[in-house]
Image (cartoon, helix red, strand yellow):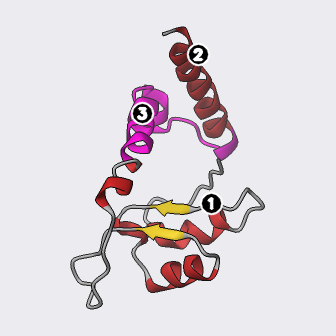
């Protein structure tokens, strides 16, 4: 997993290159929300032979379909973010530096993982 911080007013797809430029294992499928619906992202993923499952924006002229059964898997990621945001410090971002904020996200993630292992 890779995380990058962008300013709050930045559009989602502008941070896409930061995350996908890493030397992580090549994904087989990209599940993303409407914020990542850009022709540039779709072309980049097609060149890398990665299946994209991104719902269309309402303003898109060229219609693109989505496999809804596969797209439902994205719900697991959304639930993970929801659980992370239950930690008030993560939801409100009290920390001034990105390093301390990421450190607390790591601590919260470890706490969630340990809770998951104990059940």
Q: Please name the predominant secondary structure of the magenta segment in the image.
A: helix
Q: At x 64% / y 76%, what residue is drawn?
A: 48
Mark 2 is surrounded, within 10 Å at the Cα level, by few (under 14), some (14 to 19) or many (20 or more) other residues, namely few
The disc placed on residue 43 is none
Q: At x 60% / y 42%, what residue is drawn?
A: 96
Q: At x 64% / y 47%, what residue is drawn?
A: 1
Q: Is residue 107 left or right of residue 42?
A: right
Residue with the mark numbered 2: 114
Q: How far apart are marks 2 and 1 (CA)?
A: 26 Å
Q: Is mark 1 on a helix, strand or loop?
A: loop
Residue with the mark numbered 1: 27
Question: Could you say which is closer to the camera, residue 85 or residue 50?
Answer: 50
Extreme residue in the right direction: 23
Nearest to N terminus: mark 2 or mark 1: 1
Residue 57 found in image quarter: bottom left
Residue with the mark numbered 3: 85
Q: At x 51% / y 35%, what residue is drawn?
A: 94
Nearest to N terminus: mark 3 or mark 1: 1
């Amino acid at each position: 997993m890779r995380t990058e911080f962008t300013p709050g007013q930045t559009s989602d797809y502008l941070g896409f290159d930061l995350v996908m430029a890493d030397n992580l294992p090549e994904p087989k499928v990209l599940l993303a929300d409407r914020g990542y619906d850009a022709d540039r992202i779709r072309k980049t993923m097609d060149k890398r032979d990665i299946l994209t499952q991104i719902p269309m924006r309402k303003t898109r002229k060229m219609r693109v379909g989505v496999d809804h059964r596969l797209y439902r898997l994205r719900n697991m990621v959304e639930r993970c973010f929801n659980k992370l945001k239950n930690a008030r410090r993560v939801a409100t971002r009290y920390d001034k530096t990105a390093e301390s904020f990421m450190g607390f996200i790591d601590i919260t993630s470890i706490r969630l993982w340990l809770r998951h292992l104990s059940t």
